[in-house]
């Protein structure tokens, strides 16, 4: 299983997700542009002493990532608040790519429009909240996906 962050903007979120990836032995994939330098002390601080253990891959853009990895459609899981299917109802594979967009913009529409049936949401009861913090949403999705393969 792999975690993909498309154009993340906040180093603390990426650092926290990296720490979760280390804990669960998952690869973290970053798609540029990033809103920070990867060697930013804020990233390392959020990942604390674990950042050096992150299995990290970086790609210049979405197309480069797709061309290099060639994931099967059933291995792709986009997470957006607009997803019509709950992340509880997804059938996660061992080779799943859990894909999250930037904190301010989410995933680019040109990416998710090609596979609307692969867009999932995390349910929220209160409509006053538009979305969850990226690192919280990613961690919730990671544990939900891994429960089938623990």
Image (cartoon, rainbow, N blue to C red):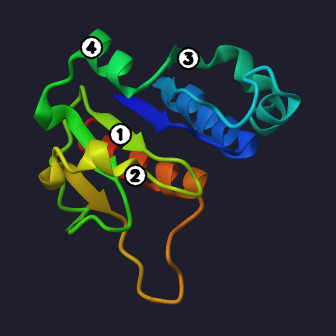
Q: Residues within 10 Å of mark 4 (few under 14, many from 20)?
A: few
Residue at 52% in and 27% down: 30
Image quadrant assignment for residue 96 = top left
Question: Mark 1 or 4, which is nearer the eye?
Answer: 4
Q: Which mark is residue 67?
A: 4
Q: Position of residue 32 (x, y in %)?
A: 55, 27
Spatial CA distance of label 1 from label 3 is 15 Å
For residue 98, the mark is 1
Whether the residues at callouts 4 and 2 have beta carbons within 8 Å, the answer is no
Of the numbered discs 4 and 2, the one sitting upstream in the chain is 4
Residue sitting at x 18%, y 49%: 118
Camera-side mark, 4 or 2: 4
Q: State the residue position of label 2.
A: 141
Identify the residue at image location x=17%, y=44%. 114
- Secondary structure beneath dot 4 equals helix
Q: Taking 115 as reference, is 31 left or right?
A: right
């Amino acid at each position: 299983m792999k975690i993909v962050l498309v154009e993340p903007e906040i180093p603390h979120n990426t650092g926290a997700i990296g720490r979760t990836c280390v804990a669960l032995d998952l690869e973290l994939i970053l798609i540029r542009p990033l809103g920070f330098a990867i060697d930013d002390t804020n990233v390392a601080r959020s990942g604390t002493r674990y950042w050096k253990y992150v299995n990290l891959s970086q790609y210049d853009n979405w197309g480069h990532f797709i061309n290099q990895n060639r994931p099967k459609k059933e291995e792709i899981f986009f997470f957006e608040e607009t997803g019509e299917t709950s992340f509880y109802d997804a059938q996660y594979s061992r080779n799943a790519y859990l894909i999250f967009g930037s904190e301010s913009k989410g995933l680019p529409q040109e990416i998710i429009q090609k596979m609307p049936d692969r867009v999932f949401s995390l349910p929220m009861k209160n409509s006053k909240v538009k979305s969850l913090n990226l690192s919280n949403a990613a961690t919730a999705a990671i544990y939900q996906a891994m429960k089938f393969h623990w």
